[in-house]
C-alpha cells in the first residue's frame, strides 16, 4: 500500500466535503411525516436558476480548495502564494457576503 500523506488526507477531506454538499442538496427536500414515511417538500427543492447557482458555487469552491491544497504542498513559493490567496479570501468573503445580502 502506498504512502498516505497529509496532502492525500486533505484531498480526501475535500472530496468528502464536496460529496456531502452534493448529497445534502439532493436529500434536503426529503422529510419524514408522522407516519414514518418520506415525502418531498416541494418548497425546498432547488430548481432552475437556484440549482444552477449552487452548481457554480460547488464548482468554484472545489476548484479553489484543491488548487490551494496543491499550492500549499508544491513548493515554498507555492506556500507563500497559498497564504496570500487565503488572506485575500478571508478579507473578500465577508465583504461579498455583506454585498450580496443587500
Image: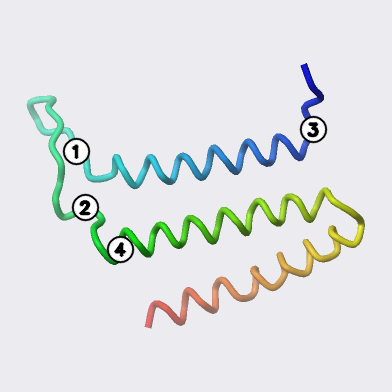
Position above or below: 20 against 46: above
Who comes first in sequence, dot 2 or dot 3?
3
Residue at 46% in and 78% down: 98
> Circles 3 and 1: CB distance less than 8 Å?
no
Q: Could you say where residue 93 lies in the image, as x and y percent from the top left?
A: 56, 71
**Left or right of 87 in this view: 43:** left
Q: Is residue 22 left or right of residue 49?
A: right
Which dot marks residue 93? none
Residue lying farthest top? Answer: 1
Secondary structure of the residue carrying tag 2 is: helix
Q: Which residue is mark 2?
A: 44
Q: Is residue 93 above or below residue 30?
A: below
Residue at mark 4: 50
Within 10 Å of the Cα at label 1, are there few (<14), some (14-19), or many (20+) other Cα atoms? some
Mark found first going from the N terminus, 3 or 4:
3
Q: Position of residue 13 (x, y in %)?
A: 61, 38
* Label number found at residue 31: 1
Q: Nearer the viewer, mark 2 or mark 3?
A: 3
Badge 1 or badge 2: first in the primary sequence: 1
Secondary structure of residue under mark 3: loop
Q: Marks 4 and 2, how far apart in space?
A: 11 Å
- Report the residue marked by disc 3: 5
Q: Which mark's residue is nearer the viewer, 4 or 1? A: 4
**Dot 4: element:** helix
Determine contact: label 1, label 2, CB under 8 Å: yes
Mark 1–mark 2 distance (CA, rounded to whole Å):
10 Å
Real-space Cα separation, disc 3 to disc 4, in angstroms: 37 Å
Mark-to-mark CA distance, 3 and 1: 39 Å
Amino acid at each position: 500500500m502506498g504512502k498516505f500523506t497529509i496532502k492525500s488526507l486533505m484531498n480526501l477531506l475535500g472530496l468528502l466535503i464536496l460529496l456531502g454538499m452534493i448529497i445534502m442538496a439532493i436529500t434536503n427536500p426529503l422529510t419524514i411525516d408522522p407516519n414514518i414515511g418520506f415525502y418531498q417538500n416541494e418548497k425546498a427543492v432547488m430548481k432552475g436558476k437556484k440549482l444552477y447557482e449552487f452548481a457554480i458555487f460547488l464548482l468554484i469552491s472545489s476548484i479553489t480548495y484543491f488548487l490551494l491544497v496543491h499550492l500549499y504542498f508544491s513548493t515554498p513559493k507555492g506556500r507563500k502564494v497559498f497564504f496570500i490567496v487565503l488572506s485575500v479570501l478571508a478579507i473578500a468573503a465577508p465583504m461579498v457576503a455583506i454585498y450580496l445580502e443587500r
